[in-house]
Image (tube, helix red, strand yellow):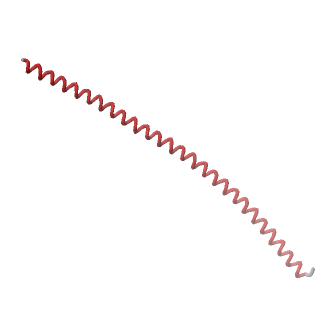
Amino acid sequence: MTGNDTTIMNDFEGKLHLLIHEYKQKVEQNNELTRRIEEKENALIELQKHCNALESSYNNLKQAKIISLSDSGIEGAKEKISRLVREIDRCIESLKK
């Protein structure tokens, strides 16, 4: 080989080593990014579970409030009916006199 061929080969080997080094860095970077994506996906799944649990809890609270309002409404209606019955009884008593 001539001096020019040796120089070309040395340049080629240097560039090849640089390319291999950059390739290894990109593989490591890709692995790191893949790991981070998996972590984010796992976190997202956990947040979705938490959101579903909160939504379920919220719906239960709404139903409980509706039931409690209905109970107080029933009690109020019973009291009102009792008052009306007493008033009717008083009216009947006054008419009898």
Vertical relation: 35 (above or below) 68: below
- Which part of the image, by quadrant, shows the C terminus? top left
- Identify whether 30 is placed above or below 91: below
The number of discs equals 0
| Vertical order, 39 against 71 (above or below) | below
| Position of residue 70 measured from the top left corner of the image (x, y, whole percent) | 33, 33
* Percent coordinates x, y for residue 91 in the rendering: 11, 23
Q: Quarter of the image holding residue 28?
A: bottom right
* Residue 36 drawn at (x, y percent): 64, 54
Q: Is residue 25 above or below residue 47?
A: below
Q: Residue at x 13, y 21 (%)?
A: 90
Find the residue positioned furthest to the right.
1
User: Would you say 3 lies left or right of 36 here?
Assistant: right
The location of residue 31, given as percent across then percent down, is 70, 57
The foreground one among 38 and 28 is: 38
Quadrant where the N terminus is found in the figure: bottom right
Residue at left offset 59%, top offset 48%: 43
The residue furthest top is 97
- The answer to whether residue 65 is left or right of residue 27 is left
Q: Residue at x 72, y 63 (%)?
A: 26
Quadrant of the rendered structure where residue 74 is?
top left
Which quarter of the picture shows residue 4? Answer: bottom right
Residue for point 54% across, 47% down: 48
Is residue 73 found left or right of 20 in the rendered image?
Answer: left
